[in-house]
Image: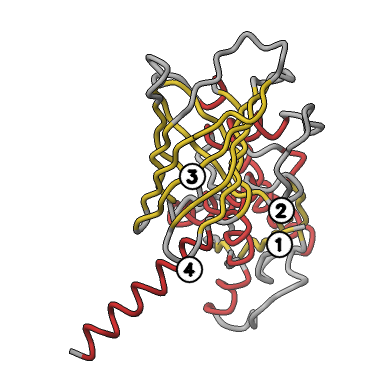
Amino acid sequence: MKFVIFTISLLFFSLIGFNQSLNGLWKGSIYPNRTSPDKGMVIYLELTADKSGTISGKSRNELYNTNDFAIKNVKGKSESNNIQLSETVIAKKAVASRTMWCRLEYQLVYNNETGYLEGTYSSNDCKNQLGKVILYRENSSFPDEIVNQESHHWFDLLAKDLLKGLNAPEIRKKERENFVFMPIYFDYDKAEIKTEYYDFLNRMIHVVEGHSDLRVKVTGHTDSDGSDAYNDDLSKKRAQAIINYFVSKGLEADRLEFDFKGEHAPIETNKTSEGRQKNRRVEFSFI
């Protein structure tokens, strides 16, 4: 009995935490079925949820790269991870717009893995208003002004992020903070990447693509067998092999920097075969 009560208590407090995590501004796209987010309408959604899951807020719809907009009041309910919202009153709309600003109903779910608030929309007062919604959390203020001073460049970036399969910014931040580097080891006198390292390299690419200000430094190393000149060249080839792999997967060359140390920066002794194997490596760092 105590275990059941404890489990229910954990569920109750986790739901409170989820409801409160909805609070704030979300930005994204609402787009018709059989299209893509870049073909949709800009949406700003500000939500306030209490402990019971009752939601209030407002939304702002904008036609892409225009000053046409509508601001609406929003109310709804959060049950478990499911969110139901409805727009009740159109508060403002652009005088020059010929767009019919429909009251929309939203069925949304927060995706814990991607960090997106996503789902569908429909309308009871406008026919054929059906489509999808995807939003991400943004630490900024709701644009109440008649002319929104913010450009829609973020809308273009969202479409590109989704096309690349990137997660929402808050998840990408955690991915970067939690990413653990590992060296890539090479066979004796070789510069070919072993297939067992592809998954790790792809995960690194995924993190870098999620941050426009992030670059990767690639540094090649060898063991002490051979001359200094030979090992310098071999370590350079190993680093270049990694660079070539990154570029082949779509990572821009200007986001990559490579260095090579030859045999001059060992991490283990070169007196044993095990130590020499660990010295035949490429290492990474974010810059």
Q: Amino acid at mark 2?
A: Val
Label 3, label 1: how far apart the Cα atoms are: 46 Å
The residue that disc 1 covers is 285
Q: Which quadrant is home to the C terminus?
A: bottom right
Q: Which of the two discs, 4 and 3, sits closer to the camera? A: 3
Q: Amino acid at mark 3?
A: Lys
* Above-or-below relation of 33 to 191: above
Task: Give the camera-side residue of 20 and 161.
Answer: 20
Residue placed under numbered mark 3 in the picture: 75
> What residue is disc 4 on?
17
**In the rendered view, does 256 fall on the left or right side of 46?**
right
Closer to us: mark 2 or mark 4? Answer: 4
Inter-mark Cα distance, 2 to 4? 36 Å
Which numbered mark, 1 or 4, is in the foreground of this view?
4
CA separation in Å, label 1 and label 4: 35 Å
Residue 142: where, in percent of width, then height?
Answer: 70, 43
Dot 2 or dot 4, earlier in sequence = 4
Inter-mark Cα distance, 2 to 1: 6 Å
Q: Is residue 275 above or below residue 242?
A: below
The residue where tag 2 is placed is 216
**Numbered label tally:** 4
> Dot 3: within a 10 Å radius of its alpha carbon, few (fewer than 14), some, or many (20 or more) residues?
some
Q: Nearer the viewer, residue 154 or 189?
A: 154
Give the amino acid type for the residue marked by disc 4 in the picture. Gly
Please give left or right for residue 67 compared with residue 84 in the image.
right
Badge 2 marks a residue whose secondary structure is strand
- Whether tag 2 and tag 1 are in contact, CB under 8 A, the answer is yes
Compared with residue 110, is residue 187 higher up or lower down, i.e. above or below? Answer: below
Label 4 – label 3 distance at C-alpha: 19 Å
| Element carrying mark 1 | strand
Give the mark, 3 or 2, whose residue is nearer the N terminus.
3
Which of the numbered marks, if any, corresponds to residue 121?
none
